[in-house]
Image: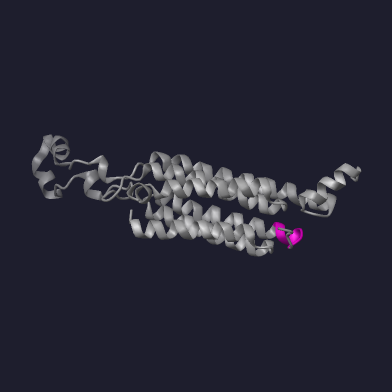
C-alpha cells in the first residue's frame, strides 16, 4: 500500500498513457483519436515533471532576494571600502539543492507542450481537409470510400 | 507537494480522461478536454513546476481548446463512438 501511495504519480501516468493509446487505436472518429493523442502527450509530460519532485520541503525553483544578493546592509558596504566585494561574498547564505525542485525536466517539457499544440493544430487541419473530401470523420466510412475508389 | 491534493487531482484526471473519450458529442469532448488541461495545470503548480503550469494554462487549455472547437464547427458535431 505504501508503495502505491508514494509512487501514485507514476501509476496514474501509466493509466493515462494506456487510455490515450487505446483511444488512438480503437476509436472510430478522427477527433476522438486526437483527444487520445493529447492525453497520451500530457501523460508523458506528467512522468517527466514527476521526476523533478523532491518530496516534502522542496519549493518552486525561484531564489529570494537574500539568496542572490546576501543579507548585508547598504551602510555596512559603504564603511567596508575596498574589500566590499569580498565582504558581500562572505555574506551569501548557503543554497541547499534539496529545498528546490529540479527545474531541468520542467524546461524540457515546456518545449514538449508547445510541440504538442503544433502537432494538434496540423492534425486538425488535415482532418478538416479529409472531411471536405469524404464528407465524414468516421474512419470506417472513409476507408470504405477509399476502397470503392471514390475521390 | 501536498499528498492529499495530489491524489485527488490524479483520480479526477483519470475520470475526466475517460469521460472525454466516451461522450458522443464532439463539442462536449473538446470542452471536457479543456477541463482536463486545467486540472493538469493545477497539478503542475502543486508539484512546483510553475513555468510548465502557466504554459499549459495558456497554450494547452486555451489554444488547443479553441482550435478544436473551430474544427468541430467546420466539420460535424456527432461522433459514432
Q: How is the image coloured?
A: one colour
Nearest the eye: A33 or A114: A33
Task: State the residue lying farthest toward the front.
Answer: A1
Residue A106 coordinates in the image, percent (x, y): 42, 43
Residue B30 coordinates in the image, percent (x, y): 63, 60
Task: State the residue lying farthest toward the right.
Answer: A149
**Is residue A61 placed above or below B46 in the rendered structure?**
above
Nearest the eye: A97 or A91: A97
Task: State the residue lying farthest toward the left.
Answer: A79
Q: Image quadrant for the C terminus of chain B?
A: bottom right
Nearest the eye: B44 or A146: A146
Q: Residue at x 45, y 56 (%)?
A: B10
User: Horizontal placement of A15 versus A4: left or right?
Assistant: right
Q: Residue at x 22, y 44 (%)?
A: A69
Residue A117 coordinates in the image, percent (x, y): 59, 48
User: Horizontal placement of A114 versus B29: left or right?
Assistant: left
Residue A136 coordinates in the image, percent (x, y): 80, 54
Q: Which residues are magenta?
A: B71-77
**Is residue B17 placed above or below A49 in the rendered structure?**
below
Q: Residue at x 60, y 45 (%)?
A: A21
- Residue A83 occupies which quadrant of the picture? top left
Asked whether B21 falls inside the magenta stretch, the response is: no
User: Horizontal placement of A79 versus B51: left or right?
Assistant: left
Amino acid at each position: 500500500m505504501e508503495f502505491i501511495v508514494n509512487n501514485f504519480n507514476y501509476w496514474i501516468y501509466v493509466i493515462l498513457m494506456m487510455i490515450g493509446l487505446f483511444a488512438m487505436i480503437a476509436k472510430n472518429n478522427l477527433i476522438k483519436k486526437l483527444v487520445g493523442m493529447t492525453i497520451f502527450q500530457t501523460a508523458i509530460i506528467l512522468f517527466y515533471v514527476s521526476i523533478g519532485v523532491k518530496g516534502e520541503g522542496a519549493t518552486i525553483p525561484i531564489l529570494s532576494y537574500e539568496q542572490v544578493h546576501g543579507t548585508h546592509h547598504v551602510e555596512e558596504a559603504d564603511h567596508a571600502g575596498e574589500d566590499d566585494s569580498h565582504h558581500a561574498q562572505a555574506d551569501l547564505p548557503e543554497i541547499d539543492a534539496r529545498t528546490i525542485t529540479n527545474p531541468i525536466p520542467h524546461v524540457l517539457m515546456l518545449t514538449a507542450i508547445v510541440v504538442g499544440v503544433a502537432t494538434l493544430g496540423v492534425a486538425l487541419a488535415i482532418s478538416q481537409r479529409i472531411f471536405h473530401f469524404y464528407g465524414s470523420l468516421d474512419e470506417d466510412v472513409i476507408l470504405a470510400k477509399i476502397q470503392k475508389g471514390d475521390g | 507537494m501536498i499528498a492529499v491534493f495530489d491524489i485527488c487531482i490524479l483520480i479526477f484526471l483519470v475520470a475526466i480522461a475517460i469521460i472525454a473519450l466516451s461522450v458522443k458529442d464532439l463539442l462536449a469532448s473538446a470542452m471536457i478536454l479543456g477541463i482536463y488541461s486545467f486540472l493538469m495545470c493545477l497539478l503542475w503548480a502543486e508539484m512546483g513546476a510553475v513555468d510548465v503550469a502557466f504554459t499549459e494554462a495558456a497554450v494547452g487549455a486555451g489554444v488547443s481548446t479553441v482550435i478544436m472547437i473551430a474544427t468541430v464547427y467546420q466539420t460535424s458535431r456527432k461522433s459514432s463512438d
